[in-house]
Amino acid sequence: MIGATIASLRQEVERACRESLGVTIEAPAIEIPPEPRLGDLAVPVAFELARRLRRAPRDIAQDLAAALRLPAAIARVEVAGAGYLNAFLDRSRFLVDLSGHLHRPPPAADGEKITVEHTNINPNKAAHIGHLRNAVLGDTLVRLLRHLGHPVEVQNYIDDTGVQVADLMVGFEELRHQDAEAVRAIEGRFDHLCWDLYAEASKYLAADPERLKLRQQTLKRLEEREPSARALADVISDRIVRCHLQTMDRIGVRYDLLPWEGDILAFNFWERAFERLRSSGAARLVSEGKNAGCWVMEMGAEEGGSESPEAGGDVQEKILVRSNGTVTYVGKDIAYQMWKFNLLDTDFHYRAFHRYPDGTVIHSTTCGKGDASSSSFGHASRVYNVIDVRQSYLQKVVATGLRAMGYPGQAEQSIHFAYEMVALSATCARELGYKLDKEDLQRPFVEVSGRRGLGVKADDLLDRLEERARSEVRSRHPDLDTEALDSAAHAIALAALRYFMLKYTRNKVIAFDFDEALAFEGETGPYLIYSAVRAANILRKLREREGPAAAEIDPGDPHIDRDYLNSPEGLEHWGLLSALARDRWVARQAVGSLELSLFGKYLFSLAQQFNTFYHHHPVLQEKNPDRRRLRILLTDLFLRQMERGLGLLGIPIPERM
RNA sequence: GCGCCCAUAGCUCAGCUGGAUAGAGCGUCGGUCUACGAAACCGAAGGUCGGGUGUUCGAAUCACCCUGGGCGCACCA
C-alpha cells in the first residue's frame, strides 16, 4: 500500500528537481527514517545533488521542500539532519486507506505461469532438517508469489534412478532378504526404516570392495528393466515418496506435480534434448583425451576470462553422455528444464497420485497410460529451482546449455534459488550419539550425511517440537480439551520450525542446534503467533462484553481520536500503523532478492511493536471512548495483517496457546 | 590451482540499492503479574563491524589486497 505513495513522491521529486533546480535525477532513493519521529519517508537526494550543484545539501533540501507539490497521501515535508527531506503522511487518511487495503483480498492470479521446484528428496531415506529448509524456503516463495498475483505450479522432482536407490535395494535384498512383496507388507514408518537401512547398506558396501559389485549388478538389472528389480525399486520409491508427502503435509507444504526421473527417460525426453544439443552445436563428441567417446558441453569462457596458461589450456567441459552411451544427471536435468519451458514438443502422461483429506490432488507423471487428461503442466515462463548452494555449478551448466541451444530467454528465466546447507553443530551431533572422528571435531560443524545415517529426521524434530509445545500449553491452560490442545501444539511447533528455517539469510550455514530450534521465546515463531493470539483475545473479550459490533470500527467514524496519531504520546500507535502498510513492499523486496527472511523479520517487527503497544496503552481499559476506538481499530488491523502475513509463512494462528 | 560463500556484542544473527546515535534475540544483572494471559514488557552492562589500502561530502555496506573458516570444480546423483 505504501508503494503507491513512494512512487508518487519519487515522481514529484523528479519533477521538482527538474523544474525548480534544473537538474534531472532518475529514480531518486526513498528511504524509511530510522525513527517514526523523524517522518515516514525520507528523501536523501540533496546529498547526491550537493556535488553537482556545488551547494550545501541542507540548502538544496530547503528549496526542494518549497518546490514540492505534495501528493494527496502526504501531509507535509520538512528538512532534517544534514539535508534529509522527510515526508509525513496524512495520518487520518492513511487509517482509512490501510483499513481498505487489509479488507480487500490480494489480487487474483494473473499473467504467465511460474514453476517452483523444491523439496526433491532422494527416495531412499526419511526427510531431514536440510530438506526442511529447502521445503520451507520453496513453499514460502510459492505463497509469496501467489500472494503477489502470479499463477504458480509447484513441482517436486523425484530422482528414482541411480545409485542411492540401488544401495537401498542391496539393503533389502542382501541384508534383509526381502523382495518387493515383502517390502510392500512392511508396517510402520517406512522412510525411517530406510534411513537406518540405507546407512547400514552403505557401510556394508564400503566394507569390502567385492561387495560393490552388488551395486553394479543392481544398477544393471534396473537399467535392463529386470522385473524383480523394477518391482522392488518401484515399491521403495513409491512408499518413501508417500512418507515424504506426509511429513511435508505436517508443515503445510504441498505440491501440484511429482515428475519422476524414470519417466523423463521413459518418454525419451533426453533423446529430444540431445538432438537439439547436437544440432545447435552445444554438445560435441570428444575423440581423444581423457573424455574420449563422451559427448560434452563446453563451460567457462563465459566471463571472457583468459585461460590460465598454467592450467595447460584445459578447457572446462561437462560430460553429458558417457563413453558407454548413458546420459548423466546434468543431461537429464537439461531435458527436464527444457520440458518446464515447453521446449521439447513432447509431454508426460499424468495420473492422480495422492488425494489430501480436503480433496486437493497431487498429480504424478507416469509412463503408463495416465488417467488425468490435464496436460496443462509445464509451460512456464519462469522457473525457480530451489536447491542448495552446493549445486550451483550444475545449475549453471543447465543455464549454459539452454543458452548454447539458442534459448537465452529461458536461460535468463531459469533462476537458481540457492541457499546454504543445514549442518549439525558439534554438540548436536554428540547429543544424537554419533561418534565424531578427529576431523569432525576440528570443524565448526558436521555435515548431515544420509550415507552415515548422520542427521536429524524431520519427523523426529517435529515430534519433539509438538511434545514441548503440548506440555507448555497444558501447563498454561489445564482445562483445554484435547482438540484445542492438539491444534495449539501443532500451530506452535509449526511456527517454531518454519520461522527458524526462514529467519537466517539464505547464504548462512545453519549449524543446527536443538536448543535454538526448540526455543519458544524471543525471536521465534511462537512469539509471532503469541502477539496475534493476544490481539485476538482482546477483540474476543470485547465482543463478549459489548457485542460483535463493538469490535467493528469504521475507520471513517468521526469518533476516533485521530489527532492522537499526531501527538508525541500517540507515537507508538502511529509507528505500528505505518509499519502495517509495508507488507507488499516487503514481500516484493523479499521475492526480488530471494531473501525471504526479510518478510519473516518484518512480521517479527510488527509483533514486537504490537507487544510494546498494548503493554503501554491499555485497549479495553481506556477511558476516553474515541481513543479506545482508535486502539480497537489498531488491534483489529494488526490481527488482520498478522493473519495474512503468517499465512504467507504457512503458519496458522491458534485460538489459545 | 580456479570459482562461490562467510567473518558485526559472551553466543546466534539483522543491517534494504553507501547515508541521520551500528540493531535484534539469547545469555548476564535489576525491575513489572488481584490488570486486555509474564511464551510478554521495561531498564542496565556489553561492539577498534577479521586486518589493510583505496573511492566518496559520507563506508559495516562499494573496489582491490591479505588472514581465518566453509562449500564447489567426477564418465555420482
Image (tube, coloured by chain):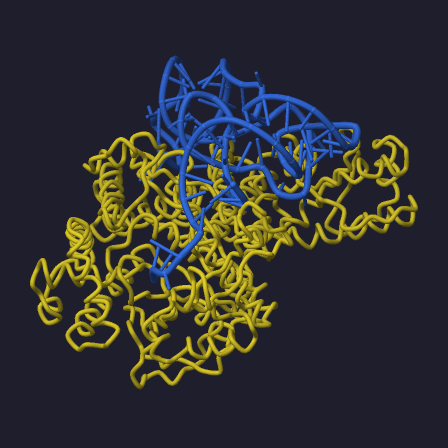
Q: Quadrant of the C terminus of chain A?
A: top left
- Seen in the image, is B71 located left or right of residue A570? left
Q: Which tint is chain B?
A: blue
**A332 vs A492: above or below:** below
Give whichever of A312, A275 is nearer the camera. A312
Residue found at x 60% / y 57% = A302
User: How many numbered circles does the render carry?
Assistant: 0
Give whichever of A129, A643 is nearer the camera. A129
**A444 vs A550: above or below:** above
Q: Quadrant of the N terminus of chain A?
A: bottom right
- Seen in the image, is A397 located left or right of residue A201? right
Residue found at x 29% / y 30% = A441
- Seen in the image, is A150 located left or right of residue A471? right
Tell me if residue A537 can be seen.
no
Residue found at x 57% / y 43% = A630
Give whichever of A391, A575 is nearer the camera. A391
**A202 vs B55: above or below:** below
Task: Estimate the x, y position of residue A123 in percent, counting from the top left.
Answer: 27, 62
Give whichever of A192, A307 is nearer the camera. A307
Tell me if residue A98 can be seen.
yes
Residue A241's image quarter? bottom left
Task: Estimate the x, y position of residue B62 in percent, counting from the top left.
Answer: 66, 39
Residue with the most extreme front position:
A288
Chain rendered yellow? A
Task: Estimate the x, y position of residue A32 in percent, counting from the top left.
Answer: 66, 40
Task: Estimate the x, y position of residue A599 in percent, counting from the top left.
Answer: 51, 48
- Seen in the image, is A601 located left or right of residue A431? right
